[in-house]
Image: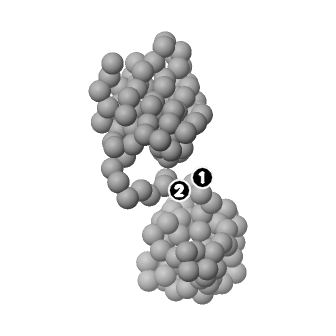
Amino acid sequence: MQNLNAIREKDLIKTFKVMLREKEYRSQEELAYELSIRGFESISQSKVSRLLTKVGAIRSRNAHQKIIYQLPDEMIIPKVNYAIDSIALNIVNNGSQIVVKTGAGGAPIIARILDSLESSFGIMGTIAGDDTVLVIPSNTKNILKVEEDISELFELTLN
């Protein structure tokens, strides 16, 4: 029974995070109601409060100055109004590091996307300037694979 509860709790947390990404919620009651619609019935306001704390949600103002619950920026991949492949322009490596060149102001969004994929792409971390992203691979022996994965993601031609 304990494993079933643990699985249900993981599903609840996953659903809760998806909800916070998909829509703006102004109250814990709205969140509890939405959870009930999604099959998690009998979720109290205090349980919603604990979930908000557990996932690290914050209260902030939206574009209309209404207070809403949302996940912190670093947990969300940014949304853009244009294709990512139009932001990233070029990729090269020197055997130990990878550099992705972007259009002006494009490096932070590319770095954030890569940071969100870091372990699956073999990336230790990134550093973003205005139009350049420095990508540090977890293992330099796999640098060509990391570079290839990044170039496929952003539809870049390898040099």
| Residue name at image x 67 percent, y 62 percent | 56
Residue 58 placed where, x, y %? 67, 68
Q: Are marks 2 and 1 in contact (CB under 8 Å)?
A: yes
Q: Is residue 136 visible?
A: yes
Q: What numbered label is drawn on residue 76?
A: 2
Identify the secondary structure beneath mark 2. Answer: loop
| Residue found at the far front of this picture | 104
Residue 12 placed where, x, y %? 53, 68
Q: Is residue 24 above or below residue 151?
A: below
Tell me the quarter of the picture where residue 128 sits.
Answer: top right
Q: Quadrant of the C terminus?
A: top left
Residue 112 placed where, x, y %? 53, 45
Q: What residue type is disc 2 on?
A: Ile
Query: Which residue carries the number 1 mark?
Result: 74
Identify the secondary structure beneath mark 1. Answer: helix
Judge from the rendering whether residue 74 lies leftward or rightward of residue 151; answer left or right.
right
Q: How many marks?
A: 2
Tell me the quarter of the picture where residue 65 sits.
Answer: bottom right
